[in-house]
Image (cartoon, rainbow, N blue to C red):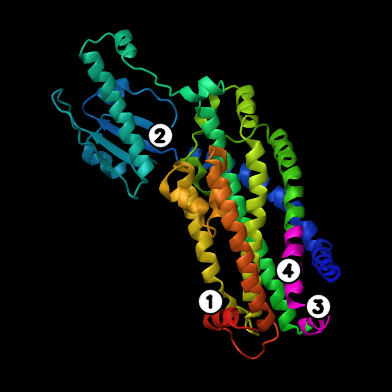
């Protein structure tokens, strides 16, 4: 046990004392804040520069009369001849020429022609179609002599409320809790995805370096291979936990300072791994901040935090031990690792895909399977935790993960013990399977 502690201490201190560790630990929150605000300002800049100057020849007269300029594309109306306009519109600095033919009130479909020297984006065409369509809608409403006040009363704003939440927890909307749960699910799932890849790869590189430099031959003479492998996995994991702890403290502080410096947090910034498709920022504006805070602390943190830590540790140990085993199979050519780590990376990628589905449908059959299957559960189940999955599913998932983790550590230890001292031969997946079932 004393030797194991020495290995853990050495693996931890060697990495923590490096300048690169300090630089990455400090720069990562700064990079996160820079990316967050940079994407916001870049999106705003792109929005401003996506405005098109459009020359409109409107023979119907409807668009010119009923269109109300509210940002977006800039329309300039003209009464010139279409053949002449086609020749000069681009020279005059216009991005597009739109020709609206005379309109018959009986028509339901209006064919509008446009001319552009370049292919416009789909969003640009969609915006032009929407602007023209809204103008003709206003024209038809006025033409039909409908009372605008009566017409406005025909529209009903529907808001879904969770009746069970109202009765049991006092939640009067249900939506704000769902938004918070969705955001938290994305953060936890993506965090575990990154941890498995980043720190698992560090374990593999550490094993590779010691084997290639022949240092391991000296180490093995005084310590068991299993202790060496386990010490590396725990030591590198401790480095990862240290970084995460520092980031948890610094990222909110840096974001707050950046928000004060820039004046406000960007509203149109990009979000992580497609989160914008799941959460509409407009939904948060209808809820007061005290309600958001209340719902955030109303989540079942007594289950979420302990379970997240256990899945974090289980997933890390399971995959890091496999990465360590792969590190022993690498010879002098480090490029060989690419062909050996694919059996490890494929389950992780599949788990990430299932995680996205689980956030949208947390109780679907795919989500339940992914959160229980040990190779997927370290990523999928944490993403389901904010949606209150059944306790038996969480318990079963943890039991299977722990058993699988123990099995993989045992398998990796057998491969590690044999492969760490093998030189001059490129190990294959078949060789690693033979090592697993050997009696040595």
Q: Which residue is mark 1?
A: 339
Q: Is residue 34 visible?
A: no
The spot of residue 350 in percent (x, y) is 48, 59
For mark 3, what is the residue? 223
Residue that mark 4 sits on? 230
192 sits left or right of 207 in the view: left
Q: Residue at x 28, y 29 (%)?
A: 133
Q: Nearer the viewer, mark 3 or mark 2?
A: 3
Residue at horizontal 40%, vertical 34%? Answer: 73
On residue 73, the disc is 2
Cα distance in 3D space between marks 4 and 3 = 11 Å
Gap in Å between the C-alphas at discs 3 and 2? 71 Å
Q: Label 2 crowding class (10 Å Cα cut-off): few <14, some 14-19, many 20+?
A: some
Most prominent secondary structure in the magenta stretch?
helix
User: At numbered mark 3, what does the secondary structure look like: helix, strand or loop?
Assistant: loop
Q: Quadrant of residue 155?
A: top left
- Which comes sooner in the sequence, label 4 or label 3? 3
User: Eyeballing the image, is 356 above or below 160?
Assistant: below
Residues packed near mark 3 inside 10 Å, few (<14), some (14 to 19) or many (20 plus): few
Q: Position of residue 261 (x, y in %)?
A: 72, 36
Which range is magenta? 216-239
Label ID, residue 89: none
Q: Secondary structure at mark 4?
A: helix
Q: Residues at badges 4 and 3 in contact (C-beta under 8 Å)?
A: no
Pinpoint residue 193: horizontal percent, then vertical percent: 59, 55
The correct choice, above or below, for 96 with respect to 19 in the image is above
Secondary structure under badge 2? loop
Residue 260, by quadrant, is: top right
The CA distance from mark 1 to mark 4 is 24 Å
User: Which quarter of the figure is the C terminus placed in?
Assistant: bottom right
Along the line of sight, which residue is nearer the eye, 124 or 438? Answer: 438
């Amino acid at each position: 046990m004393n030797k194991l502690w020495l290995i853990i201490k050495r693996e931890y201190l060697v990495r923590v004392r490096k300048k690169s560790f300090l630089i990455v630990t400090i720069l990562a929150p700064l990079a996160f804040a820079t990316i967050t605000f940079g994407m916001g300002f870049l999106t705003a800049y792109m929005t401003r520069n996506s405005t098109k100057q459009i020359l409109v020849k409107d023979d119907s007269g409807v668009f010119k009369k009923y269109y109300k300029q509210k940002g977006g594309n800039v329309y300039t109306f003209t009464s010139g001849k279409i053949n002449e306009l086609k020749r000069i519109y681009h020279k005059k600095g216009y991005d597009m020429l739109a020709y609206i033919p005379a309109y018959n009130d009986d028509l339901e479909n209006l064919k509008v022609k446009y001319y552009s020297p370049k292919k416009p984006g789909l969003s640009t065409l969609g915006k032009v179609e929407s602007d023209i369509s809204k103008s003709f809608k206003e024209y038809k409403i006025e033409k039909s002599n409908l009372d605008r006040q009566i017409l406005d009363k025909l529209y009903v704003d529907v808001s879904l409320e969770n009746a069970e939440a109202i009765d049991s927890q006092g939640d009067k909307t249900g939506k704000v809790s769902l938004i918070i749960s969705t955001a938290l699910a994305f953060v936890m799932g993506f965090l575990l995805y990154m941890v498995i890849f980043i720190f698992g790869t560090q374990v593999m590189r550490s094993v590779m370096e010691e084997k290639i430099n022949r240092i391991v031959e000296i180490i093995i003479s005084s310590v068991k291979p299993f202790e060496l492998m386990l010490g590396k996995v725990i030591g590198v994991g401790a480095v990862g936990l240290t970084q995460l702890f520092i980031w948890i403290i610094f990222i909110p502080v840096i974001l707050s300072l950046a928000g004060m410096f820039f004046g406000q947090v960007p509203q149109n910034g990009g979000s992580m791994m497609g989160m914008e498709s799941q959460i509409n920022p407009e939904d948060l504006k209808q809820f007061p901040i005290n309600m958001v805070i209340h719902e955030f602390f109303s989540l079942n943190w007594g289950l979420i935090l302990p379970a997240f830590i256990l899945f974090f540790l289980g997933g890390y140990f399971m995959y890091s031990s496999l990465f360590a085993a792969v590190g022993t199979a690498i010879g002098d050519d480090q490029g060989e690792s690419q062909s050996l780590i694919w059996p490890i990376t494929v389950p992780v990628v599949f788990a990430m895909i299932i995680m996205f589905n689980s956030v949208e449908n947390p109780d679907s059959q795919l989500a339940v399977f992914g959160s229980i299957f040990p190779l997927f559960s370290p990523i999928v189940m944490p993403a389901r935790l904010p949606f209150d999955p059944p306790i038996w599913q969480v318990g079963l998932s943890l039991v299977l993960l722990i058993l699988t983790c123990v099995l993989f550590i045992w398998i990796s230890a057998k491969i590690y013990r044999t492969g760490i001292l093998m030189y001059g031969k490129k190990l294959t997946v078949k060789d690693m399977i033979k090592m697993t079932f050997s009696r040595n």
